[in-house]
Image: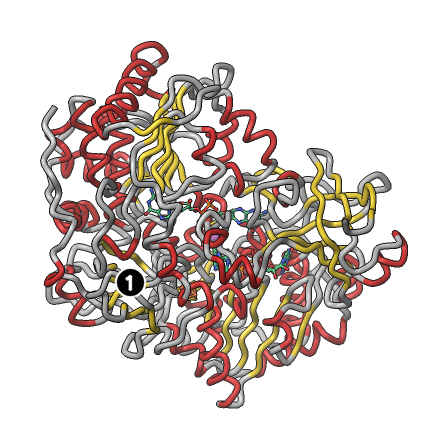
Amino acid sequence: MTTTTLPLVRSRDELAIRTHCPYCAFQCGIRMADTAGESVPQIQGDPHFPVNNGQLCIKGWTSFALLNHPRRLLHPLVRDSRADEFREASWDEALDRIADAMSRTKTAHGADANGVFGSGALTNEKAYLLGKFARLALGTANIDYNGRWCMSSAAGGGNRAFGIDRGLPFPIEDIARSEVVVLVGSNCADTLPPIMQWFEKQKANGGRLAVVDPRRTETARRADLHLGVTPGSDLALANGLLYLAIEDGFLNREYIADRTNGFEAVRATVLNYHPAAVERITGVGEPQMRQLLRWMGAAKSCLILSGRGPEQHSKGVDTVHAWINLALALGLPGKPNSGWATLTGQGNGQGGREHGQKADQLPGYRSIENPEHREAIANVWGVPAESLPRKGKSACELLDSLGPTGGIRTLFVMGSNIAVASPDKTRVLNRLKSTEFLAVCDAFANETTALADVVLPVFQWAEESGTMTNFEGRVLHRRPTVRPPRGVRGDLEILRELAERLDHGHQFQFESAEDVFAEFRRATAGSTADYSGISYAKIDAQDGVFWPCPYDDHPGTPRLFAERFHHADGRAKFFAVEHRPGGEHPDDAYPYFFTTGRYKEHYNSGAQTRLVSKLVHERPRPMLQLHPTVAERHAIFTDSLVTLESRRGRAEFHAEITPDIRPDTLFAAFHWGGSDSANTLTNMALDPISRMPEYKLAAVRIASVRPTE
Ligand SMILES: Nc1nc2c(c(=O)[nH]1)N[C@H]1C(S)=C(S)[C@@H](COP(=O)(O)OP(=O)(O)OC[C@H]3O[C@@H](n4cnc5c(=O)[nH]c(N)nc54)[C@H](O)[C@@H]3O)O[C@H]1N2
Ligand SMILES: Nc1nc2c(c(=O)[nH]1)N[C@H]1C(S)=C(S)[C@@H](COP(=O)(O)OP(=O)(O)OC[C@H]3O[C@@H](n4cnc5c(=O)[nH]c(N)nc54)[C@H](O)[C@@H]3O)O[C@H]1N2
Ligand code: SF4
Ligand SMILES: [Mo]
């Protein structure tokens, strides 16, 4: 077997000191303090990076703890059966085992019996190469990723309405100049903390902030208006606001006529959303609705920013449409410091959703079912277009098809802790256990690696090169700042090694991340997400380049939509959408809404942040937020242990009693994987368009309460 070594590991002289945080889509600029000694490198916010301006959140400034963490995986791990313990193995043995399992599966059950699961944590180069690996080396249709759980509803709505999906179609600085900002189901004071500097500037400029959330969150506390919406009712609220916009004469008729299609059907629909009806569905009072709409209607500039709250529902896409409809009716998208946008979540949640690790997608936001798009990528890859697989299964459907009955027998995971993060976790755990072979690439052991047959230890962010696209669509350079420990390898090298073993090595001949980027640029040329004019040097020189950037001298595109939208006729589209209940609704048996979200100290499945002692000390466990009236009804005291049950499972949490949540709603964060795992309760009801599961709405009951031990 040929094993060339990638020069991804740099000598000390080549190491940079400026790079970006490993975690969220804000991709804060960080500076590594002197790494010359053997001690752990320290991290500071990069004062020269114009997005965070030196600020970091607690996760960012403790992220160095992951780099030489004692629990870092340093050797490939293998085992012959799941009953055995793992043993350390050579890279050749571990890679051979994975390639053999994939070949066996393909021979016995067909190419689509191999599944691949990627991540919005991966660099653009990795996301691109993982998609190429699945389509060429495995020939499988079945690749999807955790961004399906994250940005898919926002992306679905954005694409359909505007013809393009870039989280913010403008740079972050526009927030500071917007007169009214409406945050719909985003708790960004905890989830993108350095963003608050831009809201502070907005406030100093006389601006107003409104927050729509069933909880009075840290973000809501900083707002001028908080609308404590019933979970799953944001669509009705947006339609209700549009009803009021019509009634109060705030429609921008000229804009609607010149720049959009489809308003009449929307008008007809929203006429049924009079305030009294909307108040019944949403629990938001008419005076608050009128107040918000008047602010929005009268403002010279207004932004609607969407978070996961309205999106992670079985009607996520329609809900996104309802808010975009409102924005279009008021004439906001394309107007300075105005519009609709979504706050992307994962570090490369944006780039990760553009370059082909999605079941229905090829690089450059191309569609795998579109003949021209297939042809373009087949040309770059040097294969006939007919040989490319068709559309595969979306994340939840892929996981739900694992095992002999579902048909996907082998799963290769890069960058997700599925066993904690997926909805209806017990069902997914059973599926993972029924795979014939599970391989996971990760820097640390987690609840998913615990189920694997082979675990491959990988580089972490500060140890390798690559590009990340932040929530603004700004392409950044993740620079290596420290050397990785001996014995671990990069994800790119792993893909190349596996491709070689699967007799596709000739399609994976690259020596560095920048080599992969060179091919990737070509693959995006002429596409919606065109990166072909971007280079590492250009990113370094400009502190990021906004896509689309179609040729070498092109400066990048910070703002979209000023002149036209990205549909062929240049117009944006309205979609008439109606409120509907979620996958389940509270009833006598399961009387409460259960919704989920995040703490500022932990990141997603917690696989990384639960290893950082400072973060564990600050936030050792999830707490069940519940209203004092619920506490009284069930004799719950602060810290009581409350067992919740949904139709799918049970979980036990310590109680946190607070008036900052609706009396019909219970909330817990999902960062843990044990008996206090929120995802044992959540529902895999999927959005028909985005295939997003309903993380933000399950019906639960309080099964028992006991005092703290
Ligand atoms: N600290 C931290 N930061 C993170 C992450 C993390 O795990 N931890 N993850 C990153 C990722 S991947 C993502 S996707 C983003 C997510 O960022 P956010 O969207 O801010 O995150 P969430 O906490 O999931 O949800 C936001 C809010 O939605 C509210 N909500 C629940 N149900 C509903 C509803 O039906 N309607 C409305 N309007 N609101 C509702 C919740 O109460 C919660 O306050 O954060 C990113 N940043
Ligand atoms: N109940 C509930 N569940 C949710 C959500 C919710 O709001 N409520 N939110 C959903 C959302 S928005 C998201 S994004 C998902 C996220 O949940 P997951 O998909 O589990 O994502 P992470 O916890 O970020 O896990 C990333 C794993 O990848 C590893 N990793 C990081 N970078 C790399 C890399 O470059 N290469 C490799 N090989 N590994 C890497 C990390 O060490 C970690 O183990 O959770 C979803 N689950
Ligand atoms: S806001 Fe996001 S990118 Fe910035 S330090 Fe915190 S986790 Fe890292
Ligand atoms: Mo996410």
The residue sitting at the front extreme is 38
Establish whether ligand 3 lies closer than 8 Å to the Cβ of label 1: no
Nearer to the camera, 534 or 60: 60
Q: Quadrant of residue 552?
A: bottom left
Q: Quadrant of residue 533?
A: bottom left
Mark 1 neighbour density, 10 Å: few (under 14) some (14–19) many (20 or more):
few
The residue sitting at the top extreme is 108
Q: Amino acid at mark 1?
A: Ser
- Residue drawn at x 33%, y 68% is 43
Q: Is residue 405 above or below residue 603?
A: above
Q: Is residue 485 left or right of residue 593?
A: left
- Residue drawn at x 58%, y 54% is 319
Q: Is residue 681 left or right of residue 506?
A: right
Nearer to the camera, 416 or 238: 416
- Residue drawn at x 27%, y 57% is 462
Nearer to the camera, 205 or 611: 611
User: Residue 168 appears at what percent x and percent y?
Assistant: 40, 65
User: Residue 475 appears at what percent x and percent y?
Assistant: 27, 61
- Residue drawn at x 44%, y 83% is 177
Question: In this view of the protein, can residue 263 be seen by the observer?
Answer: yes
Q: How many marks?
A: 1
Which residue is label 1 attached to? Answer: 39
Q: Is residue 641 above or below residue 244?
A: above
User: Residue 623 appears at what percent x and percent y?
Assistant: 68, 55
Question: In this view of the protein, can residue 164 be seen by the observer?
Answer: no
Which element type, helix, strand or loop, lies under badge 1? loop
Q: Quadrant of residue 630?
A: bottom right
User: Residue 115 appears at what percent x and percent y?
Assistant: 38, 27
- Locate the N terminus and report the quarter of the image it occupies: top left
The coloring applied to the image is: secondary structure
Q: Quadrant of ligand 3?
A: bottom left
